[in-house]
Image (cartoon, rainbow, N blue to C red):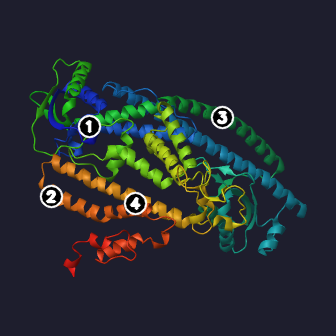
Amino acid sequence: MGSLFRGEKMCLAQLFVQSEAAYSCVSELGELGLVQFRDLNPNVSAFHRKFVSEVRRCDEMERKIRYIEKEVKLAGVKIEENLSFVPAPLPKAMIDLEAACEKTENELREVNQSNEVLQRNYLELKEHQCVLENARDFFAHVHLHDEGGHYQRLLDEEAGARSSRDSNTLDFIAGVIERERVPAFEQMLWRVSRGNVFLRYAEIIEPFNDPITGNEIHKFVFILFYQGSQLGMRVKRICEGFRASQYPCPEDFNERNEMSTGIATRLQDLQIVLVQMDDHRQRLLASAAVNLSSWFIKVRKLKAIYHTLNMFNFDVTSRCLIGECWCPADELGDIRLALQRGTQKSGSSVPSILNRISTTANPPTYNKTNKFTLAFQELTDAYGVATYREVNPAPFAIITFPFLFGVMFGDAGHGLLLALFGLWLILKENKLKYSMGNDDMFGPIYGGRYMILLMGLFSIYGGFIYNDCFSKSLNIFGSAWTVNGTECLKDFDPDTMARAMLDPKVCFSGNPYPFGLDPIWQIAPANNLNFINSLKMRLSVILGIMQMTFGVLLSSVNHVINGQRHRLFLEFLPQIIFMVAIFGYLVFLIFFKWFAFGPWNSDTAPNLINVLIYMFQLQVPDPVMYSNQFFSNPFRNWFR
């Protein structure tokens, strides 16, 4: 608690490491987490630093891993979380990691490209099959109207032309178009051909899946008839402009059946290939999902190490790297041991050197935390980080924050659920560390598990004070309000609200409810909210003023620590006098009114706000709060 009450003493140290041992030493220091390096190359661009190529390689590997992760999530494959410690890989292992990421990415891209091509072919065959099926129905419908098997008469009726079959040939185009484009497509054909094109279309009931996006697409099969090569060129251009797929469709019935049979055979073969390719893709993604978590950790550690090494200066003559870092003065021994482990791991014969240097720069603030105090420290730092060696409010927030939350929440039932949820997070913290702890949404909830437990416990306490459990009162000890010796809550008729209008001068038993609010207030018809809201408001004022006064008292400790004793008289003393003389006096009036006024003299009780207003106006309130209140202001006549 001593180190949490004030930040650790920091010192500036200079580090000399050999080039071959620099990576391992920085890796060990990073795992230790006690060092903050200074950038000794502030004027050097990030593109001209020594290890910029390694950082770029790490960025490229991270991009590949993100691509693999996206494909794994889209396929619904569960990513196995690594529950063990993953050390930073050695520099020579970076090549193997890079090769593994590149191999997995290339295989995935090849499989996806092949799958996309096969899906597109499958979609085209399905569309062609639908065209043949609908064309057969359409031709059968036309044959009923033209037993000769020709469509000239139908075209003449639509276009109004009178020409013979021998002089002009009738051509048609069959294809598939998206449902949203059909109205505009039909309108454009009518305008361009001036009504000389006969169009017939039918909706495909089963939607298709886009091979690129995977979205469902509804399409129509269309067949249009026209005469003349010039009109045919215009019609084909319109089809291309509306992205309508055109498919061959023989006019002869036997040829259409033969083509439809061949397409069905190809569809069966293609479906078998798609199933096998999907199985191969799932196996590839499952094998990648096993290593995905560890790959992420390794690449990020690699990138952090090389980014840190870019802050060092390179001494050409001594072939060593020179860096400066802030570190806790009491942890220098552990830092030197970490450097020694890094040197031994790299196989270097020259030991690394760590020298403490003097400086006038302002050190950073470092507060040593553990898994219990970490959430409260982060909550405090979110509002503002204390300056170096300043009093840290985090240890006091461990109690005050959950307590004030319980005062605000004040429900024993919901508080119990919150406490049980926090207790479950604590009991399962090892299993949830890498799954829930690394999640962007649920990570803060996991990190604040001890805070959630305390918030739930204090909410239970506040709920019993307010006698509120799931917004209902609990009659545990029996109501203190009686009528002729009978408890009010027994034989209470909710339809007769007059029973709840109890005069405290007559109906009160004399012994208050043992703990919290009397449950009779839950059914009070008229003054329920007036009494409960007034009580909660006064409790909030008392606790808020206590909190502010305690904050002012903490500032005096900073003045003493910093040797600024004059600020005790010029800043702290006026603040505390102003706080106590006004708001502290208000708290005194609240307690005094609770003790001095009861049911027998409640009609003569003054209003607290009026008392404060009269005090600032240098007037005597009517009625007075206590005797000789007029003489409580000895400077009253000075301001007349």
Q: What percent of the width, then of the height, locates residue 391?
A: 24, 46
Res 347 seen here: yes
Q: Quadrant of residue 592?
A: bottom left
Secondary structure beneath disc 3? helix
Camera-side mark, 3 or 1: 1
- The residue positioned 72% from the left and 37% from the top of the image is 268
User: Could you tell me if residue 149 is visible in this image?
Assistant: no
Q: CA distance from mark 1 to mark 2?
A: 28 Å
Residue in the foreground of this view, choosing between 488 and 567: 488
Q: Amino acid at mark 2?
A: Phe
Q: Amino acid at mark 3?
A: Val
Q: Circle 4 sits on which residue?
A: 591
Q: Position of residue 415 (x, y in %)?
A: 53, 47
Q: Of helix, strand and loop, which one carries label 1?
A: helix
Quadrant for the C terminus in the image? bottom left
| Res 197 quadrant in image | bottom right
Looking at the image, residue 145 sits to the left or right of residue 184; the answer is right
The quarter of the displayed image where residue 343 is located? top left
Mark 3 or mark 2: which comes first in sequence? 3
Residue 3 numbered mark, or none: 1
The disc labelled 4 sits on which kind of residue? Answer: Phe
**Helix, strand or loop status at disc 2:** helix
Q: Label 3, on which residue?
A: 275
Provide residue 60's location: percent of width, then percent of height: 37, 39
In front: label 1 or label 4: 4
Please state if 61 lies on the left or on the right of 458 as rendered. left
Pick the residue in front: 354 or 218: 354
Give how far apart the Cα atoms at labels 3 and 1 are.
Answer: 62 Å
Point out the tag, 3 or 1, that comes first from the N-terminus: 1
Q: Residue 569: give its label.
A: 2
Residue at position x 58%, y 33% in the image: 282
